[in-house]
Amino acid sequence: MNSINNVAYPIVDHCNLNCRGCCRFCNPSQEKHFADPKIFEKDLRRFKELVEHIEMFRIFGGEPLLHPELSKFIYIARDIYPKSEIDIVTNGLLLDKMSDELINDIKSCCVHLEISVYEPTKKKLPKIMDILEKNKLGHTLNFVDKFWKRMDMSGSSDYVRIWKECQWKKCNGLRDGKFMMCPLPVVIKEFNRLFDTDFNFDDELIDIYDPKLTFEDIRDFISRPHKYCSYCTDPEFLEWSAFTGEIKAEDYAVIDACGKRFDK
Ligand code: SF4
Ligand code: SF4
């Protein structure tokens, strides 16, 4: 059986938290966007023709619990990939607002909750844990107090080395008929909107509806660096904080468009 390790499908672009340096460029001025379950199903059925098994399929955001039809995505994913681990990746802030119906759907489909615990989540943690334990919901808590930024706006990094050391290269993504190594080629559009830049990596996405596409093509695609990796550099750590006031390119980027470090 052909198989890959990870696929994440974002079902909501925006978020109810505004972490400075968010790797998906979520921000307070972002437009709301909800994925269509019919397109999700079509994409996943086509992807299954190419990749029979995914070890871990992650329902992603922004914040996926903002989607009013989250249950539909869960059932579709479980139907198409019955043996995969299916995770919802969440900041946890809405876990105490889940309906009984949604809780039952999560349990029925054996979905695991991958909870990133930020400062605002910590404050609600006792209540969240109560709900998780009372309902016996499978979960992992990932405590986050540090973030890192890693964009090189000049696109001149040593991209082969950067790619080799990158953890996100395993965060393969699927969305609207396109498969990608990591979210950058898709989420860069929000960076363009914020800072009036024109980065475009569309030609480095895989069209899953290409009739000539094979599993081997996908395997090869995730085994090598891509042009857009030259827009990442060595990560620079920052303490977690939420946006207050103006959003600047240096909240996300280490190196500016002229190749200079922002702090120099
Ligand atoms: S919770 Fe996650 S998706 Fe939301 S702003 Fe923070 S890092 Fe981004
Ligand atoms: S663009 Fe390349 S180096 Fe940057 S996060 Fe994605 S896979 Fe990693």
Image (spheres, rainbow, N blue to C red):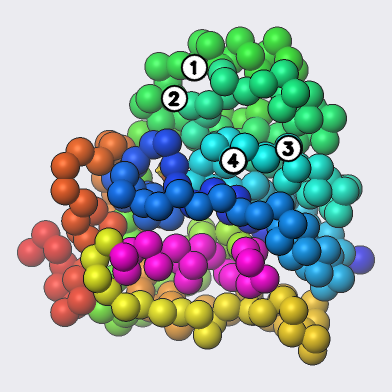
Name the amino acid type tagged 1.
Leu
Q: Does 125 appear above or below 256?
A: above
User: What's the CA distance linking mark 3 and mark 1?
Assistant: 23 Å
Q: Is mark 4 within 8 Å of ligand 1?
A: no
Which element is circle 3 on? helix
> Of marks 1 and 4, which one's residue comes earlier in the chain?
4
Residue 253 visible in this rendered orientation of the protein: no
Badge 4 crowding class, 10 Å Cα cut-off, few under 14, some 14 to 19, many 20 or more, is some
Q: Say which residue label 1 marks.
A: 125
User: What's the CA distance linking mark 3 and mark 2?
Assistant: 23 Å
Q: Say which residue label 2 marks.
A: 121
User: What's the CA distance linking mark 1 and mark 2?
Assistant: 6 Å
Q: What is the x, y in percent for residue 82?
A: 88, 48
Q: Which mark is residue 71?
A: 3
Q: Say which residue label 4 marks.
A: 67
Whether tag 4 and tag 2 are in contact, CB under 8 A, the answer is no
Answer whether residue 189 is magenta in the image. Answer: yes
Name the amino acid type tagged 4.
His
User: What's the CA distance linking mark 4 and mark 2?
Assistant: 19 Å
